[in-house]
Image (tube, rainbow, N blue to C red):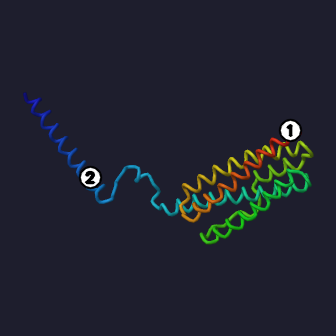
Amino acid sequence: MKIQKHALTVSKLFLGLTIVVSCNRQADVANGSTNDSTEDLRPANNESADATEDQQFFNRVALTDLKEIEVGKLAQQKRPGTPTAAFGQMLVSDHSASSQKLKSLASKMGITLPSELDKNGKAVRDSLSGLQGKEFDTRFAAMMVDGHKEAIALMKEISEYAAKTEFRKWASEKIPVLESHLSHAEQLQQQVQKR
């Protein structure tokens, strides 16, 4: 009998605590405040974390632009008068414009961009520079298809997750241009394969 009374008392106490916690939670939600345990896992300085993430996004885009410009110039030099050279010219033109807008946006946000190719960009450029003729066209077209798929994915990520609204807007406006590049790259790849 004592055990049953004790169990009943514990149950009532537990029920009371549950109601109090639940009521406090509902009051927090009604006031627009939530104390999810996930909030405790966030960095203490969210602005600092957001700025670091945006810096990484900016760097990735800047390095992509630099690589596309270099590879586009290489395509024009190695394959003049061909569809590959025409695609290269489009890359140089569009990615130079993108780079200028990115620099302006970065400057407003106090972000410094890389000004030269990284190891990956140099490796891509160098791997293409040793190729000639159809071999160059084939490798170049394949790189452009893969590279533009990656660039589109990056812009979609930035357009959703960048901290600054202006940066998200800029990225979303870039997606149609990159999709157009991808379409042209796929057409170029088909032309090259038919030769």
Front-most of residues 159 and 44? 159
Left or right: 46, with 26 as reference point: right
Task: Determine the residue positioned at 80% across, 53% down.
Answer: 122
User: Which residue reaches farthest left?
Assistant: 1
Quarter containing the C terminus: top right
Q: How many marks?
A: 2
Left or right: 54, with 1 as reference point: right
Q: Secondary structure at mark 1?
A: helix
Q: Secondary structure at mark 2?
A: helix
Front-most of residues 90 and 33? 90
Residue tagged 1: 194
Q: Amino acid at mark 2?
A: Gln
Quarter containing the N terminus: top left
Give neighbour class at mark 2: few <14, some 14-19, many 20+ (Cα, 10 Å). some
Task: Determine the residue positioned at 74% across, 45% down.
Answer: 145
> From the viewer's perspective, is residue 18 above or below residue 112?
above
Give neighbour class at mark 1: few <14, some 14-19, many 20+ (Cα, 10 Å). few
Residue tagged 2: 26
